[in-house]
Every structure is written in C-alpha cells, then in structure tokens.
Amino acid sequence: MNSNNYSSTRPAPTPDQERGGLFAIFGNPLGQSLSPLMHNAAFAEMGLTAQYRVCQTGNAAEAVRRIREMDLRGASVTLPLKETVMPFLDEVDRNAREIGAVNTIVHRDGRLRGYNTDGPGLVRDLEEWFGIRGKTFIVLGAGGAARAALLSLLQAGGTPVVVNRTPERAEALAGRFGCRWVPTAEIGRLQADCLINTTPVGMFPETDRTPLPKRELARFSHVMDMIYNPVKTRLLREAGAAGCIVRSGVGMFVHQGAEQFRLWTGMEPPRERMRQAVLERLGENGGD
Ligand code: NAP
C-alpha cells in the first residue's frame, strides 16, 4: 500500500468537526445511485451537519486524490473502482482483501483504510429473513458481489454453491473459496434452500430480462435478488408466481450502507430511516 505525506499528528477533531464533514461516492456511472439520498437522510436523522456528495470518475488515482484534497471523512466506492482503488489505500481490511474489492473508505489521521460492507450487509439481511447456518445457497454469478457473498456465507456457517454463465469463472471462484460449482445450464442438478442472484441481469433499465428461466425456480423455497432497482425484478416476480418466498436487494443495500455509516461515524446507524428513504425513492412503501 502507498505511504502518504500526511502527518498522523494532526489535532484531534473538534465536536463540530465530528458532527459535520464531507463524504462522497466515487464511480461511474452514478446517475442511479441511491447512496447520497440514503446517507444524507441518515445524517439528518442523527442531527449531524455532515454532507454526502457525488463524485463521478472511473479513475482510481483521481478518486483518491480528491478524497485527500477535499479532506473527505469517508467515501463509498462503486463500479468500476472497487478493485482498482485498492493499491492506492494505506490499509485494506482483511475481509476486503479476501474478497478483492473495497466499497468503503475511511479517512482518519491522514490515512485511508478500505473495507467491504457488502458481505456484512448480505449476512444481516439474510439473518433477518430466514437464517444462514446449515443452509445451502446457490450464488448465481461470479463477480465482485458473488465473492462478497461467498466469503460472508461461509463465515456465517452456510454452504454456497457457485453457478455462472462462464464455467471457467465459476470454477476459479469456487476453487478460491473451496466450494462446489456448476455451469448455469446445469442448475437443474442442484438442490438448495435459497437462490441468490448476484448478476446485474434484470436491473433498471433492462427490467424485462431475467438470469434464469422460470421453469428452474419452483424448487427453491427462497429466492433473493441483490438488485434493488426495481424492487421486484422479473426474477422475483416469476419466483413469487412459482411459490417461492422472495427478497429484493433493498435490505442488503440498506445494511451495507448502515455498516458504512457506522465505520465513518462510530454511531449506531438509523436503519429504518435509511430504508424508508430508499423505498420512497423506489416507489415502494413497504418492505419485502
Ligand atoms: P460484476 O462483477 O460485473 O459481475 C457480473 C456477474 O454477472 C458475472 O459473473 C457475469 O457472468 C454475470 N452476468 C453478467 N451479465 C450476464 C448475463 N447476461 N447472463 C448471465 N450472467 C451474466 O458485477 P458485481 O459487482 O458482482 O454486481 C452484480 C450485481 O450485484 C449488480 O446488479 C449490483 O447492483 C448488485 N449488488 C447489489 C448490492 C446490494 O447492496 N444490494 C451490493 C453489491 C452488488 P460471466 O462471468 O459469465 O461474465
């Protein structure tokens, strides 16, 4: 990791600085991001004067330079920076290193520390829903979200199986985490308690797409889609019609953001206010 020119002997922040300060999300594109809305709602709810902004860039070096120049207290990192930003940070948390992706940066005492809150967000949401320990999960996809899912499911006592369109990527990912895998075309061979879609197929604006034919769905009691826009993807609509209990990505999104809030502020996050802000924007009043 890079060293930096910042002194670690800066004066401790005043109470006003603790309540305020700037945060931002970095990535490209960011037009659809709900993180600014969610975090600004959380700051207001907690009586903080902090602000969360949008910084659109796909360049990791530029993102890190801007975090330092603007003296941000923290940042969210999304596509395409989750992996490329890692070499520019002073430290990367062990889980983020194992996943190979950072979605959160904490800037404290001149040092930038990277974390990944997607896994903890998923675990908290699944525990609230139907539990993890002793259960088998099909993880559909083999990208960054799948890596976060595999590590966190294993840590929480679940058994993930990787299913992916490109068999070589499924095999490589499964090998890295010591789990089973099959190509998507052979998903009919598998039994599992829950299917989790980690692919972007069906996400706004391509809402008429789905990653699996509906005939494959009825054998899963639970189906979750990490996508949260739309809240009810075609996959979830077809799974619901096939008798599955379904869950959108809203809960995971709120919990991963809540873990970011905790890392940045040290405060207990106002999860219900954050969920409400997200669902209001997505046009849904209830949970799922
Ligand atoms: P990624 O790294 O680009 O991974 C994409 C994966 O999806 C790859 O394995 C790819 O398969 C597969 N895929 C892409 N297009 C496909 C298609 N047409 N048919 C079948 N498979 C396809 O993306 P990511 O970072 O993992 O993110 C994936 C999704 O998770 C996004 O929708 C993101 O919004 C969501 N997510 C949600 C949360 C949340 O808080 N709810 C958090 C993180 C991510 P190949 O290997 O065959 O190319």
Image (spheres, rainbow, N blue to C red):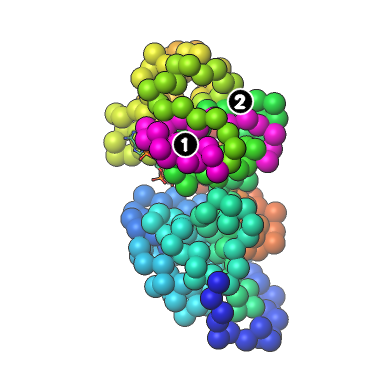
Q: Residue at the spot x=50%, y=64% of the render?
A: 86
* Helix, strand or loop under label 1: helix
Residue 147 drawn above or below residue 210: below
For this rendering, which residue is in front, 78 or 237? 78
Residue 216 drawn above or below residue 210: above
Q: Residue at the spot x=64%, y=57% of the render?
A: 94
- Looking at the rendering, the stretch of residues picked out in magenta corresponds to 155-176
Under mark 2, the amino acid is Thr
Q: Is residue 262 shown in magenta?
A: no
Q: Quadrant of ligand 1?
A: top left
Image-based side of 255 in relation to 166, left or right: right
Discs 2/1, front: 1
Residue 194: x percent and y percent?
A: 56, 24
Q: Residue at the spot x=59%, y=37% of the render?
A: 178
Q: State the CA–CA distance, disc 2 to disc 1.
A: 18 Å
* Helix, strand or loop under label 2: strand
Rendered-image quadrant of the N terminus: bottom right
Residue 30 visible from this viewpoint: yes
Residue 188 drawn above or below residue 275: above
Under mark 1, the amino acid is Glu
Q: Which residue is mark 1?
A: 171
Q: Residues within 10 Å of mark 2 (few under 14, many from 20)?
A: some
